[in-house]
Image (cartoon, rainbow, N blue to C red):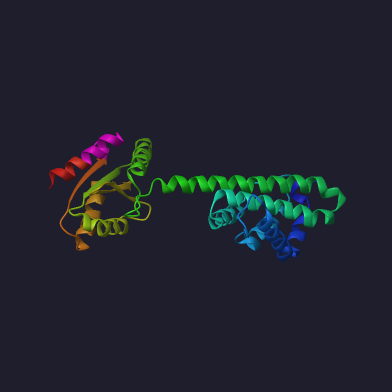
Amino acid sequence: MGNAERQPLAIAKLLRDDVDGIVDDWRELCRWDPMLPPQSNPPIAAALVSALADALGHPQPLGWGPDPEMEKVVGAFTLSAGSLDIAIGQLVCLGESLRRRLFDRIPDGEVDETHLRLEMIIDRAIGAAAQQAAARAEMQTLIDSPTGLLNRYALERDLRRELARSVRYKRPVCLLVIRVPAENALQAFATALRDGVRAGDLAYRVDADELAAVLAESTATVGETVVARLTAAGLPAFTYGIAAHPDDGEDPEEMLELARQRASASA
């Protein structure tokens, strides 16, 4: 019998039919687990159990292949749990709850495969939680807290990436640097710049009084259009500089320095 003809494991239906009972048992285990905070309560518990049932319902013989829905639910679960350690501890408790509550109801011929698949799915959920938590932590290090824009580290990373793509595919890219005239105008400029670029383009805070935008697949003319939007927004008078590939080269550090020099020269 081919894999496509295999019937879902019995545990998938057992899970769907007993979501509330499993959630109650899981919460009880979490509340008493010495590795978790007192009265620990797993978030979106029913949604995660339902997603787990769907994953186990897939007819592949072993494991959990790419499952965007499961990853989405695990991401929301990890975020709501408050920390990676708590999320992992609660997922471990979920696996134990399922083994305690369901394994005596699994047909004898499916016990081994069910055990392997359940173990693999819980392990991959823990791995997905760790990856998503790491990605969020990295993103937090790239955010400028006062403005909510990306910071200079993010700009250097993204400009390097966009220039490499532009060189490879022979497409333009534009870097705009804005010199903010006064500290008390910083937030207004940050908001206007974020709103003034196209969807997919990103805005950054480069220095105390400098903002920037990387405009993908754009010439200097697009940068001038963004400047016109900022001017029309009624902001205080400001200076700016534009550097664009290919006219201004393909080195990210040199392009950034050139745009900053042009912003200073226009003062």
Along the horizontal axis of the image, is 98 left or right of 172? right
Q: Position of residue 12 (x, y in %)?
A: 74, 57
Residue toward you, 82 or 51: 82
Along the horizontal axis of the image, is 1 left or right of 34? right
Is there any visible trace of residue 133 in the rendered image?
A: yes
Residue lying at the far right of the rendered structure = 108
Is there any visible trace of residue 64 in the rendered image?
A: no
Is 161 one of the magenta-colored residues? no
Residue toward you, 139 or 266: 139
Tell me what residue is drawn at x 56 percent, y 56 percent. 81
Tell me what residue is drawn at x 30 percent, y 59 percent. 191
Span colored in magenta: 245-259
Along the horizontal axis of the image, is 25 left or right of 248? right
Q: Position of residue 42 (x, y in %)?
A: 62, 59
Tag count in the figure?
0
Tell me what residue is drawn at x 64 percent, y 61 percent. 45
Q: Position of residue 23 (x, y in %)?
A: 69, 62
Q: Position of residue 122 (x, y in %)?
A: 67, 48
Residue toward you, 33 or 25: 33
Along the horizontal axis of the image, is 66 left or right of 114? left
Quadrant hosting residue 244:
top left
